[in-house]
Amino acid sequence: MIRHVVLFTWTAEATAQQQALVATELRALRPLLTGVRAYHVGPDAGLADGNYDFAVVGDFDDAASYLAYRDHPAHRAIIEQTVLPIVAERVSIQYEL
Amino acid sequence: MIRHVVLFTWTAEATAQQQALVATELRALRPLLTGVRAYHVGPDAGLADGNYDFAVVGDFDDAASYLAYRDHPAHRAIIEQTVLPIVAERVSIQYEL
């Protein structure tokens, strides 16, 4: 199983509405995907200083399922239209579970 | 439930043995902890360029369980002795599942 992790910080200009829309749209992706074991996104809980702002963690059957998610047209559309306009920083990893 | 995520990059000087020891020692922590639903660490799988090097994802019953993990003496010892000597960058988040 492959776990895909992305953490974002948002720009200072990003509104609460824009930030919330990222979560709403990404969660709506799941029924379109295959080979997804778990998919949980959400904003920082405020437990520590210096954290990133938003997390995406998806568990996939294999690398092919992850790559299909990465390249899915509906996912790319969310990235282009909803995520990129408010991203300051993005870091990511995929690792074997 | 609280999910805790940390991503690291290692210094150019970090040896493969040093990197592997981080995973080994963190995995050995789990029996010492309470309120842990899942705890998976591992190195980047090499599926994408520009990724971070190592991931830690822990799912805890609540914020108190996460904070007990964060502050556990055995965890702090691993951070001081095994992680900090090879860390280049560290980013983190905690979010509600």
Image (spheres, coloured by chain):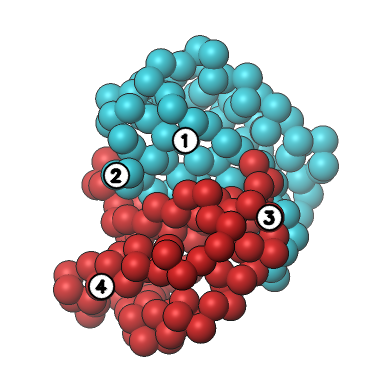
Chain colours: A cyan, B red
Image coords of residue A68 (percent x, y): 36, 21
Q: Which mark is residue B74?
A: none
The residue type indicated by label 4 comes to Leu
Identify the residue under disc 2.
Answer: A96
Within 10 Å of disc 1 (Cα), the crowding (few <14, some 14-19, many 20+) is many
Relative to the observer, which residue lies in front, B73 or A82?
B73
The residue identified by callout 1 is A58
Q: Nearer the viewer, mark 4 or mark 3?
A: 3
Q: Amino acid at mark 2?
A: Glu
Q: Are marks 2 and 4 on the same chain?
A: no
Please give left or right for residue B23 compared with residue A5 in the image: left
Q: Label 1 amino acid?
A: Gly
Q: CA distance from mark 2 to mark 4?
A: 17 Å
Please give the residue where the numbered disc 3 appears in the rendered image. B62
Q: Are the residues tagged 3 and 2 within 8 Å (C-beta)? A: no
Residue A17 placement (x, y as % from top left): 82, 35
Secondary structure under the numbered disc 1 in the rendered image: strand
Looking at the rendered structure, whether the residues under marks 4 and 3 are on a common chain is answered as: yes
How far separated are the C-alphas under marks 4 and 3? Answer: 28 Å
Quadrant where the image shows the N terminus of chain A: top left
